[in-house]
Each structure stands twice: as C-alpha cells, then as structure tokens.
Image: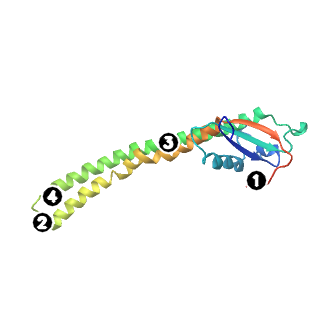
Amino acid sequence: MSSAGHELCLHLDSIRSLIPADGDPLGGTLPASIAEELVTRARALDEGVQLTIRFLAPDAGVASERVSASAIEARLHAHFARVAHRHDLQIRDIFRFARVSTAVGLLCVIVLLACAQAIPDDAGKLMNGLRESLNIFAWVAMWRPAELWLYAHLPERHWRRLALRLGGATVSVEASPRAPAQP
C-alpha cells in the first residue's frame, strides 16, 4: 500500500499485453484477463481509499516497445467508464422493471382482494379458506416489486462504484527486471 492509498501492482510479460490482440478498434478496452485481475484485487480493498495501479513489465522502458503511461491510463479510464455506464443502464432497467411489476402487482392486489371481499364471512370453512388464500396471494404478488425497489439495484451500484474507483485510479508503467507468472 502506498501513502496515497492502495496500490495494485500487476506484473506483465510484456507491456504490449495491455493492448488486446484484435488491435482494439474501440480504442479503449483492456484485455479481459487484466481487467478481471484488477477488479478481483480492488474489490478486496477499502472503498474509501484512492487506488494506484502500477504495471510492471520488462519491456516497459524499451524504446521500440514504449507505450506511454498516459495512453495506458486513458485506456484504463475509458474501459472502466464504459463498465460503470453498463451498470448505470442495469440500474435503470431494474427500476423500469420495478415500475412495471408494481403496476402488475397492484392490479393483482386489487382484483384478488376484491374477490376475497366478495366471499361472505358466513360462507363456510372452505370459502373462508379460499378468502384467506386470496388475501395471502394478493400480498405475495407485491413481493417481487418490493424486492426490485429495495434490493435488486444494490449489487449493480456496488459494481458501478468499483468500476468508477478503478477508472479514477492513478496509473504508472515501470520497467521490471523480469515478469513473474501472473496468478
């Protein structure tokens, strides 16, 4: 850990491994294995502390293989900005589904409670059981909308915050004598 926050140090076989094999037509994605490694390491750290990412590769200082730290930092920031945006879209979808399921659930509640109220109190044990079943089913119909409104968006918010933290990290690229095998 550095004095400014948590440091994520990744040893690479080559600095060129930060650029996807397909030449990256989007101009800002990280290879999946590197992005996944960063997410795995960052999720175990305190959320309130700034991240610093340090890439170490034996060819980082070689003139013919020189990839600027600012280009790598821009690529990393763009990658995680897109990831955060995807989580934003997921959160919006969850709330859209919550609105639709609330409307359907409320319609079920109204219809089922109206049916339950139509059964007279002195209709017998079987009908009383049916009335109670309709009451229970009416409120169970609101379970999923309540889950969407209260809880379903929380994991997406967590992953969005993590992507924003990684996207805001300070990045450095340094030469190393040799790159150990990556876990």
| Residue to which mark 2 is pinned | 124
Q: Is residue 164 left or right of residue 37?
A: left
Q: Which mark is residue 119?
A: 4
Front one among 92 and 79:
79
Distance from the alpha carbon under mark 2 to that under mark 3 = 48 Å
Q: Is residue 143 left or right of residue 70?
A: left
Quarter of the image with the C terminus is: bottom right
Distance from the alpha carbon under mark 1 to that under mark 4 = 69 Å
Q: Is residue 92 left or right of residue 25?
A: left
Q: Which mark is residue 91?
A: 3
- Camera-nearest label, 2 or 3: 3
Front one among 33 and 171:
171
User: Would you say the residues marked 2 and 3 are in contact, meaning their CB atoms lie under 8 Å apart?
Assistant: no
**Element carrying mark 2:** loop
**Element carrying mark 4:** loop
Amino acid type of the residue that numbered disc 4 sits on in the rendered structure: Ile
Amino acid type of the residue that numbered disc 3 sits on in the rendered structure: Ile
Q: Which callout, 2 or 3, points at the residue further toward the start of the chain?
A: 3
Distance from the alpha carbon under mark 4 to that under mark 2 = 10 Å
Q: Which callout, 1 or 3, points at the residue further toward the start of the chain?
A: 3
| Residue to which mark 1 is pinned | 182
**Element carrying mark 3:** helix
Distance from the alpha carbon under mark 1 to that under mark 3 = 33 Å
